[in-house]
Amino acid sequence: MLRTIFILAITGFIISFYAYFTETKLKEDASYKPVCDISERISCSKPLQSEYANLFFISNTIVGIIFYVSIAILAFFNMAAAIFYAAIASGVATIYLAYLLYFKVQSLCIVCTSLYVVNALILFFSYKEMFK
């Protein structure tokens, strides 16, 4: 299970890094059109440029990068309990961010939704690891 969690953490890191790259590029160049912008309703630039992109006075993308690196390190060192509790916290954050995305920003962000799935899988596998 910890190997799976490690792979999920690396996946989350890569997706978060792409989101960070996209967010930075959008700030530098207003005409930049990321690959994840498919339509007006299916857009990653819309939430990345919204007022909710920096909930803790730091970009959510940076928080994601730090979170997934931390989970990868914890998985590498077989710290299942710490992963489980961090996954619970990320689950709560995921629910709140999904609410903001779908009801406030009113967008379907493929990048964001992919991270929500990664978070749910980390929670699932960490639960299985804790209570096996």
Image: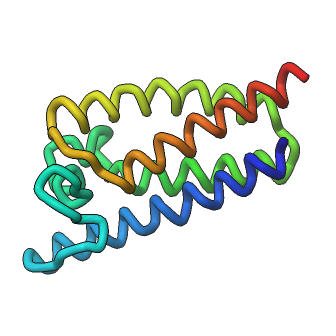
Residue in view at x 27 percent, y 71 percent? 24
Residue in view at x 33 percent, y 34 percent? 97
**Viewer-side residue, 113 vs 12:** 113
Residue 56: where, in percent of width, then height? 32, 39
**Viewer-side residue, 71 vs 100:** 100
Residue in view at x 36 percent, y 65 percent? 20
Say above or below: 65 vs 85.
Answer: below
Say above or below: 80 vs 77.
Answer: above
Label total for image: 0
Residue 75: where, in percent of width, then height? 79, 47
The N terminus lies in quadrant: top right
Residue 72: where, in percent of width, then height? 71, 53
Picture quarter containing residue 85?
Answer: top right
Q: What is the residue that sits farthest to the top in this orientation? A: 131
34 lies left or right of 27: right
Say above or below: 18 vs 68.
Answer: below
37 lies left or right of 88: left
130 lies left or right of 69: right
Picture quarter containing residue 79?
Answer: top right
